[in-house]
Each structure stands twice: as structure tokens, then as C-alpha cells.
Amino acid sequence: MVRQPSINAQHRAPLSIERITEAALQIVDGQGLGRLTMRRLGDALEVEAMAIYHHLPRGKEQLLDGLVAHVASAPADTGAAAGSWRDVLRSWARDYRARLLAHAGVLPLVVTRRNPVALAATVASLREVLRRGGVAEEPAAVAAHTLLGYVIGHAALEVRGTAEDGADRAVDWDARFAAGLDLVLAGAG
């Protein structure tokens, strides 16, 4: 079946990696990762699925890498003048957690997909904030990875709804995150 161009086709933005990634993210956010297919993505973009391969020659593998990069690449603001380095990292951690939770369908990819480039800028910027705060290079590298691991791990537990302490009461995820973050940052420097 040949797809007929829609009336709005002439008013639609041209196909681009950014547009493809955003449409894929909407599918994952709304329907789950398991429902992301190139055909469904093509339908969402109002193009034939094969048109997507012009921008993503490796197909779905490249698309999944792009989703990880889009969601997981959130460098800390190393130029932030207001507040201490702990304040900068605390703000980054809260924002990063919110980003991961907003795109919880991509979280399994962030945790399991081997895509070192996607997180490299984030780790480097966290390390830079720590170094500017007076933390030596080696401890800063360890602390950056620890902080990143804490935020990703906490978001993963939160998405699962795990009450890992066995409590039979509702978990206050915000309070739990803040308390754990304070422990991580206290040990960072």
C-alpha cells in the first residue's frame, strides 16, 4: 500500500534525527518500549518506515542509542556560579532524576545498553564540578560515577515501585532520594 501524503504534509517539519528521536520518545513514553517498531514510528511521523533508515542507517539499534543519548545526556552546569559545588550537584541530581522518571520507558536502555558516549559528557561535567569544588582528580572521578549510579539506580527502583526495605507503608520517594543524595554528597568531598 502506498501512503498518500496528508494535507498537512507540506506544513510538517522535514524528517531529521531530532524529529525521529522525539517521535520515538513519545511512543515509548505513551505505549512502552516494547511497542516501538520502525513501522509504528513511520506511522507517527507520517512517512514510510524505510524513510527513517535514510537518517538512521543502523536502524533500530541506532534509534535506541539515540534515545539513550537524548535522555541520559544531562551534563551538570559547570558554569553555575550560585551556590557551592554540592548545591550544583544536588540541583543536577534532582533534575536528572526527574528527566529519567519522565522517560521511564527508556530507563531500561540507560541501565543495560552499552553506550559509553551517551554518559561520557555527563560524567565529565560532574567530575569538573567536583574538581572546581576542591576534590582531587581520582576521588572526583569516583564520586562522579557514584553520583550518576545513585541517581540512575534510585530512579530504577522508584519506577519499579520497590519498597526494598520491606516496609508495608507507602514510600516517600522524594524524601528517600534527598536523604540518600545527602549521604552520597557528604562522602564526595
Image (tube, rainbow, N blue to C red):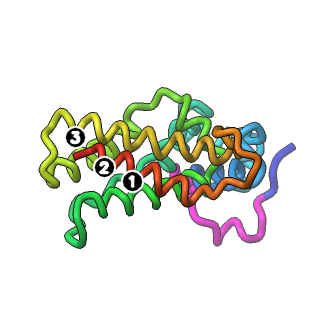
**Residue 28 image position (x, y, % from top left):** 69, 48
Residue named by callout 3 = 140
Decide which of tag 1 and tag 3 comes sooner along the chain. 3
Q: Give amino acid for label 1.
A: Asp
Q: Tell whether label 3 touches label 2 (CB within 8 Å).
A: no
| Quadrant of res 80 | bottom left
Specify the segment rendered in magenta: 5-19
Residue named by callout 2 = 186
* Residue 170 versus residue 123 in the image, above or below: below
> Viewer-nearest of labels 1 and 3?
1
Q: Closest to the observer: 90 or 35? A: 90
Residue named by callout 1 = 182
Query: Which residue is pictured at 64% across the width and 39% down the height?
Result: 165
Secondary element at tag 2 = helix
User: Is residue 43 visible to us here?
Assistant: no
* Other-residue count near label 2 (Cα within 10 Å), few / some / many at <14 / 14–19 / ≥20: few
Q: CA distance from mark 1 to mark 3?
A: 16 Å
Q: Tell whether 121 sits left or right of 139.
A: right
Secondary element at tag 1 = helix
Q: Give amino acid for label 3.
A: Ala
Q: Closest to the observer: 15 or 37? A: 37
User: Is residue 138 visible to us here?
Assistant: yes
Residue 8 in the magenta stretch? The answer is yes
Q: How many marks?
A: 3
